[in-house]
Image (cartoon, rainbow, N blue to C red):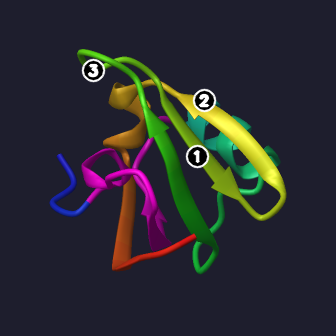
């Protein structure tokens, strides 16, 4: 499991993607949606009880499962949209 992952962010926090640790099928889907190393990602909303996460990467908004978010390593977490 990744130590500092997307699933730890709170709404309004911004981070930079450092690595994708997912299996190849999911990794290809994430890459197609713009999830690349060095891109900034914003946590918009968190679902109830480990529900889906609503994030923005560039101009694209995506809903991710918590399990998928734990496979996206992030750094440089800051606050503010």
Q: Determine the residue positioned at 35% across, 29% down.
A: 66
| Residue under pointer 2 | 63
Helix, strand or loop status at disc 3: loop
For label 2, count other residues whose C-alpha is less than 10 Å away and answer few (under 14), some (14-19) or many (20+): some
For label 1, count other residues whose C-alpha is less than 10 Å away and answer few (under 14), some (14-19) or many (20+): many
Res 52 quadrant in image = top left
Dot label at residue 1: none
- Give the mark nearest the N terminus, 3 or 2: 3
The answer to whether 65 appears left or right of 9 in the picture is right
Question: From mark 3 to mark 1, how far is it between C-alphas?
Answer: 15 Å
**Where in the figure is residue 81, as x and y percent of width and height?**
58, 70
Question: From mark 1 to mark 2, how far is it between C-alphas?
Answer: 6 Å
The answer to whether 50 appears left or right of 76 in the picture is left
Helix, strand or loop status at disc 2: strand
| Residue under pointer 1 | 55
- Give the mark nearest the N terminus, 1 or 2: 1
Are circles 1 and 2 on residues that touch, CB within 8 Å?
yes
Range of residues picked out in magenta: 5-23
Question: From mark 3 to mark 2, how far is it between C-alphas?
Answer: 13 Å
- Give the mark nearest the N terminus, 3 or 1: 3
Whether residue 14 is situated above or below residue 57 in the rendered picture: below
For label 3, count other residues whose C-alpha is less than 10 Å away and answer few (under 14), some (14-19) or many (20+): few
**Where in the figure is residue 27, as x and y percent of width and height?**
60, 42
| Residue under pointer 3 | 50
Res 22 quadrant in image = top left
Q: Determine the residue positioned at 48% across, 38% down.
A: 45
**Where in the figure is residue 9, as x and y percent of width and height?**
32, 55
Helix, strand or loop status at disc 1: strand
Whether residue 73 is situated above or below residue 18 in the rendered picture: above
> What count of labels does the image hold?
3
């Amino acid at each position: 499991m990744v130590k500092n992952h997307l699933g730890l962010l709170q709404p309004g926090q911004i981070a930079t993607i450092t690595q994708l640790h997912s299996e190849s099928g999911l990794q290809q889907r994430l890459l197609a949606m713009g999830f690349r190393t060095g891109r900034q990602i914003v946590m918009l909303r968190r679902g109830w009880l480990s529900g889906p996460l609503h994030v923005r990467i560039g101009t694209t908004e995506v809903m991710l499962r918590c399990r998928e978010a734990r496979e996206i390593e992030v750094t440089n977490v800051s606050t503010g949209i």
